[in-house]
Amino acid sequence: MTDGFSYHAAFARNLGWVTRAEQESLRGKRVAIAGVGGVGGVHLLTLARLGIGAFHIADFDTFDIANFNRQAGAMMSTLGQPKVEVMARMALDINPELQIRQYPNGVHASNLADFFDGVDLYVDGLDFFAFPARQATFAMCAQLGIPAITAAPLGMGTAVLNFLPGRMTFEEYFGWGDLPEEEKALRFLVGLAPAGLHGPYLVDPTAINLKERRGPSTIMGCQLCAGAAATEALKILLKRGKVIAAPRGQHFDAYRNKLVHTWRPGGNRHPLQRLAMAIIRRRRAAKGA
């Protein structure tokens, strides 16, 4: 026991929404988060405050001033510091009894087995353009039967997809295969948010450039991601509540005050998805002409 800290006192206000037995169950759960920057960092702190007892966190990056608009660990005092170290300190400041295994070189083929060892749930926090790492992590989850959540910060909202053991996999939904990375980016964007709620209020479309790997972001989107993903995590870990899994998803946009439940049988093979991607390709080709 750490002096002055009591797990039961720290998370007593969760009780009522969870039972004492469920809170104790959460204390014994282990969650892996790859990427602890924008969404991943808020995922970690949110789940730590939920009372999750153990984490595996991976990130090879350090904090930069360009992270200030959205990343929980990005501050003047942390500039240049490794994200995994900063976020581990912040999580331990919430619960000093946490077990946190750090992977400062990110996730890759040589450490994936260790990264997922003993893990009950995976929450995706990787950068949008981290295609090889994302493809590898979700493939490993499918292989090991580990439930996985991805929540995308889109404008001032979030789109959430769950991938559960025995159900449609990440690869089956997005259809990445060995495609070029620019095509993977397109498929990821369209697949994450079939409803496209965020599009109408994008005031400068040139801010999104898949080829140059850049796009705008907001802290509101990241925080909404964390709230939605943590709620899905609670339901999955405690085995209660309805969990919507791919090819079904949900997209909530706070700016437009809208919630849409999406269903795309076949994932990106669905005719509506193929049409959306074809339209985007034509627009990009026209701009490049």
Image (cartoon, helix red, strand yellow):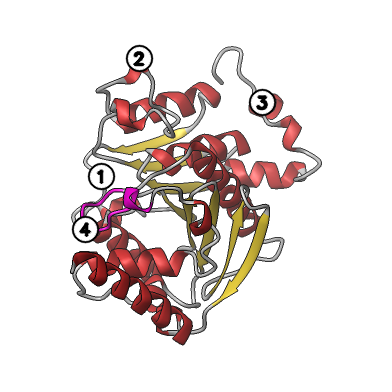
Q: Amino acid at mark 3?
A: Ala
Asked whether 31 falls inside the magenta stretch, the response is no
Q: Amino acid at mark 4?
A: Lys
Q: Which corner quadrant of the image does residue 84 belong to?
A: top left
* Viewport quadrant of the C terminus: bottom left
Asked whether 206 falls inside the magenta stretch, the response is yes
Tell me whether the residue at label 3 lies in contact with that at label 2, contact meaning CB atoms closer than 8 angstroms: no
Residue beneath label 1, please? 106
The one of 57 and 285 positioned closer to us in this rendering: 285
Residue at image coords 31%, 70%: 283
Report crowding for label 3: few under 14, some 14 to 19, many 20 or more residues within 10 A (C-alpha).
some
The one of 267 and 11 positioned closer to us in this rendering: 267
Residue beneath label 3, please? 10
Dot 2: element? helix
Please tell me whether residue 271 is drawn above or below residue 124 in the rendered image. below
Please tell me whether residue 279 is drawn above or below residue 212 in the rendered image. below
Nearest to viewer (mark 4 / mark 2): 4
Q: Distance from label 3 to label 4 (Cα)?
A: 46 Å
Residue beneath label 4, please? 211
Q: Earlier in the sequence, mark 3 or mark 4?
A: 3
Magenta region? 205-214
Q: Distance from label 2 to label 1 (Cα)?
A: 23 Å
Please tell me whether residue 247 is drawn above or below residue 249 in the rendered image. below
Q: Which mark is residue 77?
A: 2
